[in-house]
Image (cartoon, rainbow, N blue to C red):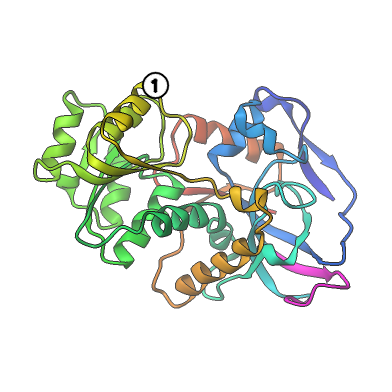
Amino acid sequence: MKAIVLSGFGDTSNFKLTDLPIPTVQANEVLVQIKATAFNPIDYQMRKGLRESRLMRSPVLGREFSGIVIETGSGASRFKPGDEVIALAGSMGSNGTYAAYISLNEQLLAKKPVNISFEQAAAIPSSGLTAWECFSRAGIWPEESIFITGATGGVGRFFIKLLKLYNVNRIVATAGSDESAKALTQLGIANDDIINYNIDSLEDAILLANGGDRFDYSADLAGGVISEIAAKVLKINGSYLDVTFLGTPETRSALFDRACKIYNIAAYAHDLSGNISWYGATLGLLADLVETNDLAPPEIKLIGDLSEASVIDAHRLMESNLIFGKKLVMTI
């Protein structure tokens, strides 16, 4: 099968189009022909050999996909050949998703929503499951307020859709460009609640957008210096959702001083605990919401077909923060 292999940590010149054997299927697994895969920041973090690279089990990167079941193992019964499916494979499959095929445990799979394309469906698993973790673990109520950094990324957009679906509307978010601000307004965020993170007195502007009050919740989807702001705008005993693990010492100090509750959001934790059925079950819930039109599918940008050029271009756009509210998707 065709696959893009990472030959070593570093820059994008290490990606090579290669022929690999089609994966074999174990008893509880299915073989899927991948139709589309989406890109995530963790991809380039792995490529660089950063902390996330410890999760790698294959030199083929890519963590989510849509596709068609080709073969089932002797103990697999949830799906049959021809079924259209989606999954967050993470590092739990035979290889990553920059490839033509993947084998993985059937409990990771959910049926693809029938009302959207393979390309749209491929953009659901990673962002959707991480956003669901944020929403379900925090337990935010409609009357409570939340500040979100990195809101125009895949997780942020999905998270905002879930918040809106469940009538949480006191949302303030940051954007760094007109294109990103437009993406947030399309999600229903009021112009006055979208704050350009390049301005002076950023903390004051964020609080002003919340009527001068500190926030019940902050969700940091960006990391770095702005995570410090996300911590400082919280009320005493507020709640902080850490999706990046990229906060600074100042972030941790501000959270401690405010006696805040911290939720570490890492979807791969369910794999580490052996609870892989969570992935398929939760993804099935999200797919149902998309299929019933209660939840809009992710906005996508097609980056090309399975090639070195497509992968290199996607990594460049992600690292340069040039996705402007759309998930990058590669057809296979």
Is 28 placed left or right of 255 in the picture?
Answer: right
Residue at figure coordinates x 44%, y 49% from the top left: 155
Looking at the image, which is closer to me, 196 or 218? 218
Is 103 placed left or right of 163 in the picture?
Answer: right
Q: Position of residue 57 (x, y in %)?
A: 76, 41
Is 55 placed left or right of 260 in the picture?
Answer: right
Looking at the image, which is closer to me, 291 or 276? 276
Provide the secondary structure element on which disc 1 rests: helix
Residue at figure coordinates x 68%, y 33% from the top left: 54
Residue at figure coordinates x 60%, y 63% from the top left: 278
Q: Is residue 101 above or below residue 246?
A: below
Q: Position of residue 139 (x, y in %)?
A: 35, 59
Q: Quadrant of residue 234?
A: top left
Looking at the image, which is closer to me, 327 or 202? 202
Neighbourhood count class around disc 1 (C-alpha, 10 Å): few under 14, some 14–19, many 20 upward: few
Query: How many numbered dots are placed on residues in this image?
Result: 1
**Within the magenta stretch, is there residue 38?**
no
Please, what is the three-letter code of the amino acid marked with disc 1? Pro
In the picture, the quarter occupied by the C terminus is bottom right
Q: Position of residue 186 (x, y in %)?
A: 29, 55
Q: Can the viewer see residue 138 in this picture?
A: yes
Q: Is residue 122 above or below residue 208?
A: below
The magenta segment is 67-80
Return the residue at label 1: 249
